[in-house]
Image: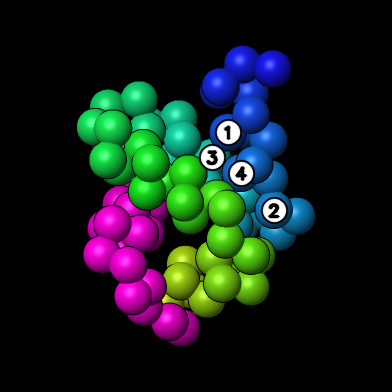
Amino acid sequence: MSEESRLRWQCRRGMRELDELLLTYLETRYPLADEAEKAAFEAVLALADPEITAYLLQRQIPTSEPIARVIEQILRRPPA
């Protein structure tokens, strides 16, 4: 399984809105990200679904600064 396929699979969380946010980031921002941001995104994908959901719905703020920056990037609208 390629790295992209693995990440794409990990973006599938079973909640359409969450899947779309994560996949949009993977397709638009991840290829341009530096290694630190890529590592932080992979750390986000390793979190439990309720934690990711809380962050993306802005019910909680991540205590990890790198994860907080990635969540902010995920929530930004991609370039048109």
Residue 49 vs residue 34: left or right?
A: right
Q: Residue at x 33, y 75 (%)?
A: 63
Distance from disc 1 to disc 4, alpha carbons, whole Å, reads: 6 Å
- Circle 3: element type: helix
Locate the C terminus and report the quarter of the image it occupies: top left
Distance from disc 3 to disc 4, alpha carbons, whole Å, reads: 6 Å
Q: Residue at x 57, y 53 (%)?
A: 46
Disc 2 marks a residue whose amino acid type is Arg
Point out the stretch of residues depicted in magenta: 59-80
Quarter assignment of residue 51: bottom right
The residue that mark 1 highlights is 7
Total count of labels: 4
Distance from disc 1 to disc 2, alpha carbons, whole Å, reads: 12 Å
Disc 3 marks a residue whose amino acid type is Leu
Please tell me whether mark 3 or mark 1 is closer to you in this view: 1
- Circle 1: element type: helix
Q: Residue at x 68, y 45 (%)?
A: 12
The residue that mark 4 highlights is 11
Q: Are marks 3 and 4 in contact (CB under 8 Å)?
A: yes
Please tell me whether mark 3 or mark 4 is closer to you in this view: 4
